[in-house]
């Protein structure tokens, strides 16, 4: 049998464990953010690899493939051309088509500034 002091210590540890477990559910996990805030649409002709990874279905490898394709072909002429990049098919394109453009990034920023004025 446990003494009163041992029971109190045991109950204390149980309470601490329960509170710690509940705190994990109640406290939101930190959100991963990027160094710069990117507005959509992202220009596939001027975006960095980091910005490209913000697009649905685009990870580090696909972002690098987009950059390689862009450099070899002097940029993209249309949004649909991105489907020529290995790893981007019709399904991924459909998910990203409203989040990309072929404008220069400066033109995108100017347009967004005009919309917010």
Image (tube, rainbow, N blue to C red):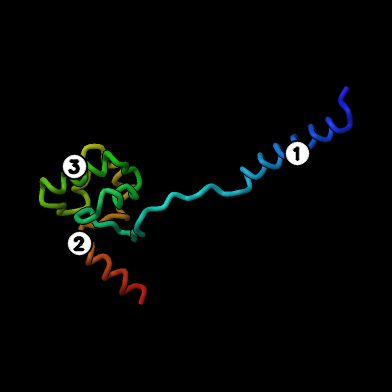
Identify the image quadrant of the N terminus: top right
Looking at the picture, does residue 18 appear above or below residue 96? above
Q: Disc 2 designates what residue? A: 104
* Quarter-of-image position of residue 59: top left
Q: Describe residue 14's horizontal placement relative to residue 59 as left or right.
A: right
Q: Which of the two residues, 25 or 65, is positioned nearer the viewer here?
A: 25
Q: Describe residue 102's horizontal placement relative to residue 12 as left or right.
A: left
Q: Which of the two residues, 80 or 108, is positioned nearer the viewer here?
A: 108
- The Cα atoms of the two marked residues, 2 and 1, are separated by 58 Å
Question: In what element is the residue under mark 3?
Answer: helix
Q: Disc 1 designates what residue? A: 15
Q: Position of residue 60 (x, y in %)?
A: 29, 41
Q: Residues within 10 Å of mark 1 (few under 14, many from 20)?
A: few
Return the residue found at the far top: 1
Q: Earlier in the sequence, mark 2 or mark 1?
A: 1
Front position among marks 1 and 3: 1
Q: Disc 3 designates what residue? A: 84
Question: In what element is the residue under mark 1?
Answer: helix
């Amino acid at each position: 049998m446990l003494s009163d002091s041992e029971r109190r210590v045991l109950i204390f540890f149980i309470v601490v464990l329960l509170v710690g477990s509940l705190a994990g559910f109640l406290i939101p996990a930190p959100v991963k953010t990027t160094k710069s805030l990117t507005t959509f649409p992202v220009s596939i002709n001027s975006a960095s690899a980091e910005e490209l990874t913000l697009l649905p279905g685009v990870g580090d490898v696909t972002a690098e493939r987009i950059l390689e394709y862009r450099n070899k072909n002097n940029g993209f002429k249309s949004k649909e051309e991105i489907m020529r990049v290995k790893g981007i098919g019709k399904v991924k394109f459909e998910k990203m088509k409203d989040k990309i453009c072929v404008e220069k990034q400066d033109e995108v920023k100017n347009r967004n500034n005009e919309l917010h004025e």
